[in-house]
Image: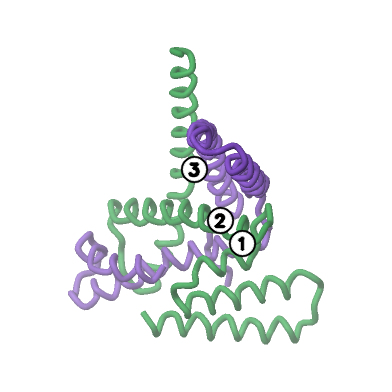
Chain colours: A purple, B green
Amino acid sequence: MEEKTFDPDLIRAIFKLVWEKRGAEREKNQLSENEAEVQFQLHLCAKVSLFRWTKYDEEKQANSCSLSNTANGNALKLSCELLRVFVAEAIQRAAAIAEAEGSLKIEATHLERILPQLLLDF
Amino acid sequence: MASDVERGEEEEEEEESASELLRDRFRLCTISIAETEAKRNGMEISQPIMACISDLAFKYAKQLARDVELFAQHAGRKSINMEDVILSAHRNDHLSASLRSFSNNLKAKEPQSDRKRKKITKKEDKAAKEVLHIDS
């Protein structure tokens, strides 16, 4: 019996959207950070500011080089499984509450009761 | 200056429409999974609740993308790994154990392994899932 799960391509598309957004934001932030850093360093003595500037430059290079942009195939399948478990847990916990109340349909009241614990667990 | 602002607004609109498209596709997947789960318990789900759960899972997926990217970056890698995904579930022991056994299944299925190994890993998978349900 094959279980229904999320489409790995859909998950990859979502990941890429988030990563590209983060990359663009990071570029914008770095530009403004550069300006602020330069202004700050101008106030200090020459030797100290030079040392700090080179160190900051190295850190910046290290951070910008390692932005993720690809996903392992198995990692995507695992993410699909994780999201499937999330949805399944939400439904099952809400169904348990609905059953205890004696109703046949899962409603908003059932969902909001399980929501805090669900978000803490995940 | 004005053209920059316009370009920024256009990019934002494009991003939003792409995000909406993904959200709709995500909702379709969620609906099929949720209906299977609900049938298992003999319950029905109301449509607004379905949309709520789908949006919740979509936000969780976006959060997962950020977490997994940070873990990979921290490890000095450019592409995300199965270990990154397992790490993002570190808050719940049963969940990470279940994910770990799932990842072992995936690793075992990759090369053409013997049937014996597949049988054993299927049993482990079932046991891990039972543990998850009992805990909830």
Q: CA distance from mark 1 to mark 2?
A: 19 Å
Residue at 35 percent across and 65 percent down: it is A119
Above or below, B110 against B23 in this view is: below
Quadrant into which the C terminus of chain A falls = bottom left
Q: How far from the left and from the top, in percent, is residue B62?
A: 47, 51
Q: Secondary structure at mark 2?
A: helix
Q: Is residue B9 left or right of residue B48?
A: right
Labels 2 and 3 within one chain = yes
Q: Secondary structure at mark 1?
A: helix
Residue at 44 percent across and 34 percent down: it is B16
Q: Could one spot residue B77 in this view of the protein? A: yes
Labels 1 and 2 within one chain = no
Q: Amino acid at mark 3?
A: Leu
Residue at 49 percent across and 29 percent down: it is B14
Question: To which residue does mark 1 refer?
Answer: A77
Q: Is residue B73 or residue B86 the one in the foreground?
A: B73
- The label shown at residue B70 is 2
Mark 3 neighbour density, 10 Å: few (under 14) some (14–19) many (20 or more)? some
Q: How many marks?
A: 3
Question: To which residue does mark 3 refer?
Answer: B22
Q: Amino acid at mark 1?
A: Lys
Q: How far from the left and from the top, in percent, is residue B79?
A: 67, 54
Q: Is residue B20 or residue B87 the one in the foreground?
A: B87
